[in-house]
Amino acid sequence: MDKVAIDLHIHSLLSPCGEEEMTPNNIVNMALIKELDFIAVTDHNTAKNLPAVMAVAKEMAKETEKGLCILPGIEVTTKEEAHILAYLPTLEAAMELDQIIYQHLPDVMNEKALFGPQTIMDENDQIIGEVDKLLISATDIGVDQLFKIVTDLGGILVPAHIDRKSYSLISSLGFIPLELDVKTCEVSKKETFENVKKNFRFFKDYQFIHGSDAHQLEDMAEREFFLELPDMRRQTLIHYLG
């Protein structure tokens, strides 16, 4: 088993709350500086910066001896206003989910002056477009519907920051539906697994991961959160989480 350093909850500048410094190249290079092994860029309700992030990581692997694995992901806001991390086995599956989510976002346009730009970049950190709909809106997809959509694409769901008093599955519903076949929950970076288990007894049957929920480079995790995996394949990580 390998001890793998992870940060599976990172936002690029495509998320309206992400800082301008969160470009594909900056994210990948910071992850390498911090000696992370697996990262996931999980923008709000979109995957449109994943092609650039994955291309940068692939090119960096050729140029250096440092390997960095990217798990394709999206932080989806369900109609219950719960944030759920959807992890997919391939970039193609993530982009398919991206298209589905966009169709289920309300027709609320982003106001740049209020929320900031929603910038799509290429692998050279050049701007190639913007997303017009406001990405921090709630979709009209329910948690149960999202589970079916993501599992049909070969992915899994991880409820995000379940310890928070807003935008978590627990704050929205008060529980995790039994029909939601979830194995792993994410806990905020500064919270402990022990406190979560103590405050919510029904969490005893779940496993937990930490995520940084980074919106700026300095907030990305150090080499501090680990999983033990037999190899560094994305499918292995998805199997562990789901």
Image (tube, helix red, strand yellow):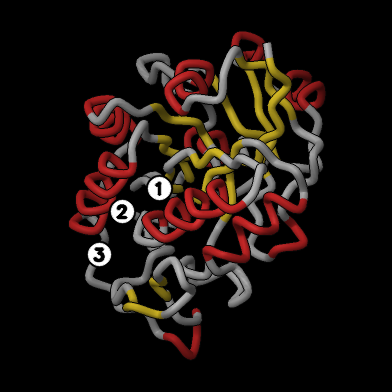
| Residue 97 appears left or right of 202 | left
Relative height, residue 11 to residue 193 (above, below): below
Q: Is residue 32 left or right of residue 224?
A: left
Residue occupying the point 65% across, 23% down? 208
Query: Residue 134's x, y, as percent?
Result: 36, 71
Q: Which residue is mark 2?
A: 139
Q: Nearer the viewer, mark 2 or mark 1?
A: 1
Q: Amino acid at mark 3?
A: Pro
Q: Mark 1 is on which residue type? A: Val
Q: Nearer the viewer, residue 220 or 123?
A: 123
Residue 21 coordinates in the image, percent (x, y): 63, 74
Looking at the image, which residue is at 40% across and 85% down? 111
- Amino acid type shown at disc 2: Thr
The answer to whether the residues at label 2 and label 1 have Cβ atoms under 8 Å apart is yes
The residue nearer to you, when weighing 55 against 183, is 55
Name which quarter of the figure residue 37 lies in: top right
Secondary structure of residue under mark 3: loop
The residue carrying mark 1 is 76
- At label 3, counting other C-alpha atoms closer than 10 Å, the crowd grade (few under 14, some 14-19, many 20 or more) is some
Q: Residue furthest bottom?
A: 113
Does 209 appear above or below 214? above
Judging by the rendered image, the residue that carries numbered circle 3 is 106
